[in-house]
């Protein structure tokens, strides 16, 4: 979702420039990496939303520094951001491999749109004629897309990672220490995750050690060494295993995480011995766990254009509210807080944006009409960041127990929780997080660009 949950969104920045010179040994890439003719990106088969977010960050970084070909290895061993200890090899089916390989191509297209937008804006900023930002960029100018090839490991007829490592035109390997794991003394890449970061007699972990081992073999074969590009701008949502207040709603075990981590003092709902809400609704024959629903949920954003990302966020918010007694607060950012956004003059006024939210919610959950409020917000944290007795938002009580947000605004959610605990002396919110998908193609900025063209 392109809007911030009671705050502004920190955008991911990807750097790019001209061709690269290789060195005698593997090196960490400089802060502004140069373009590589052929890059290898190492991803891992995701078992959670956090791992998907990590893969997206690696893919976008690799695309931003690649000029011609991008090879993507999809390792089927788990660990990485899915586990603090590493889990060896997971039981991944061929169907799952095929499905996620397709998702990688979709992610790459969206990343290309985002990089096109960035390069377009950079070209416009340097253009003396101040050409419109929507008329430039590699895609809109008809330039070729990267030659992208995805190699799911363990998929029939797919070559091993080691074959790609020895391609003569390869010059860079891009990944993250939590994914690349370690390489054995036999120069064979194996497990991933922190469990494998250092294993006596079998090698050391991390991207640098992995690339050093690959370079040792390339040297024997007379090939130039590779550069190790570590993704340092690591998304907050890629590492959430240590925060009991963060739950990704799309994860299969989300309900179990909520149940295990929920604060009993703030969850006084009646449960039976099965852990299900007494009299809980049944949807499709499946009982809803009591701990997956909240009494006072909040969600916030700009809600410019009510695109599909907004609708996804609001749908998840509705699904997190207790039936009958639960309440939902929707905060919509005031106009004066949006002047810094791209194409700000194309953002509809507050009244129009609030009307769009209420129309959608009215059709989505007509039975909740009297339990939903939509209010303008004019500060960083909105109602959940106010002292209990504050009159900043008349008629509202800061009794919220959950905040629905996208992974891009997760740092703000964590900051809000620290503020609630340290400054206000009230319990933190359960952060019900969703992975933001298609962040470039499905965004308010993209809609505003279309309006301005």
Image (cartoon, grey):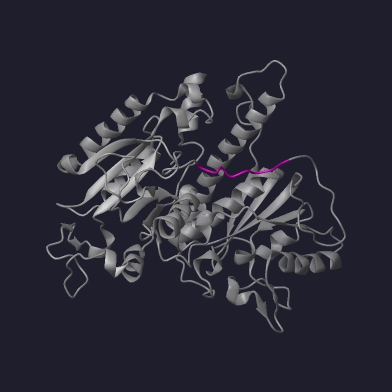
Q: Is residue 145 left or right of residue 256?
A: right
> x and y percent of residue 149 in the render?
62, 50
Instruction: Report whether residue 366 is seen.
Output: no
> x and y percent of residue 275 in the render?
22, 71
- In the image, 380 versus 113, the foreground residue is 380
Instruction: Report whether residue 146 is seen.
Output: yes
Among all residues in the image, which is located at the extreme bottom? Answer: 201
Q: In this view, does 62 lie to the left or right of 251?
A: right
- In the image, 184 versus 445, the foreground residue is 445
Report the magenta residues as a range.
9-16
Give the number of callouts: 0
Among all residues in the image, which is located at the extreme left? Answer: 279
- For the stretch drawn in magenta, the main secondary structure is loop
**Compared to 410, does 211 lie above or below?**
below
Among all residues in the image, which is located at the extreme top? Answer: 129
Q: In this view, does 284 lie to the left or right of 157?
A: left
Give the quadrant of the N terminus.
top left
User: Magenta stretch containing residue 15, yes or no?
Assistant: yes
- In the image, 246 versus 253, the foreground residue is 246
> x and y percent of residue 59 in the render?
60, 50
> x and y percent of residue 70 in the render?
66, 49
**Compared to 357, does 427 lie above or below?**
below
**Compared to 359, does 404 lie above or below?**
below
In terms of image quadrants, where is residue 199?
bottom right
Q: Tell me the residue at 70%/45% (across/down).
A: 65
User: Magenta stretch containing residue 204, yes or no?
Assistant: no
**Compared to 140, does 26 lie above or below?**
below
Q: Tell me the residue at 20%/42% (across/down).
A: 365
Q: Tell me the residue at 85%/65% (across/down).
A: 219
């Amino acid at each position: 979702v392109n809007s911030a949950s009671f705050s502004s969104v920190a955008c991911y920045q990807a750097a790019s420039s001209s061709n690269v010179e290789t060195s005698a040994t593997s090196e960490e890439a400089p802060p502004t990496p140069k373009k590589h003719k052929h890059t290898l990106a190492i991803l891992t088969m995701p078992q959670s939303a956090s791992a998907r977010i990590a893969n997206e960050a690696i893919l976008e970084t690799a695309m931003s520094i690649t000029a011609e070909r991008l090879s993507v290895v999809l390792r089927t061993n788990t660990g990485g951001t899915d586990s603090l200890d590493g889990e060896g090899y997971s039981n991944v089916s061929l169907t799952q491999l095929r499905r996620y390989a397709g998702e990688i191509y979709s992610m790459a297209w969206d990343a290309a749109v985002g990089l096109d937008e960035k390069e377009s804006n950079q070209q416009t900023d340097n253009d003396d004629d101040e050409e419109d930002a929507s008329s430039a960029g590699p895609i809109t100018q008809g330039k070729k897309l990267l030659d992208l090839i995805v190699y799911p490991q363990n998929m029939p007829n797919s070559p091993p990672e080691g074959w790609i490592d020895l391609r003569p035109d390869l010059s860079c390997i891009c990944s993250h220490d939590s994914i690349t794991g370690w390489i054995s003394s036999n120069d064979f890449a194996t497990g991933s995750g922190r469990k494998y970061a250092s294993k006596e007699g079998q090698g050391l972990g991390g991207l640098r050690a992995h690339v050093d081992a690959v370079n040792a073999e390339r040297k024997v074969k007379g090939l130039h060494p590779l550069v190790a590009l570590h993704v340092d701008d690591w998304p907050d949502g890629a590492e959430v295993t240590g925060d009991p207040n963060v739950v990704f709603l799309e994860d299969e075990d989300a309900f179990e995480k909520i149940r295990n981590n929920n604060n009993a003092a703030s969850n006084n709902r009646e449960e039976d011995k099965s852990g299900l809400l007494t009299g809980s609704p049944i949807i499709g024959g499946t009982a809803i766990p009591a701990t997956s629903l909240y009494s006072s949920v909040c969600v916030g954003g700009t809600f410019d254009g009510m695109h599909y990302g907004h609708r996804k966020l609001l749908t998840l918010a509705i699904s997190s509210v207790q039936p009958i007694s639960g309440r939902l607060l929707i905060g919509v950012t005031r106009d004066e807080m949006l002047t810094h956004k791209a194409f700000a003059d194309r953002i509809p006024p507050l009244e129009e944006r609030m009307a769009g939210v209420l129309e959608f919610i009215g059709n989505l959950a007509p039975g909740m009409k009297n339990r939903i409020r939509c209010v303008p917000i004019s500060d960083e944290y909105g109602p959940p960041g106010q002292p209990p007795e504050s009159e900043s938002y008349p008629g509202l009580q800061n009794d919220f127990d959950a905040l629905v947000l996208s992974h891009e605004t997760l740092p703000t959610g964590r900051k809000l929780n620290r503020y609630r605990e340290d400054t206000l002396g009230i319990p933190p919110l359960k952060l019900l997080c969703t992975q933001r998908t298609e962040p470039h193609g499905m965004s308010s900025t993209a809609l505003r660009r279309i309006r301005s063209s």
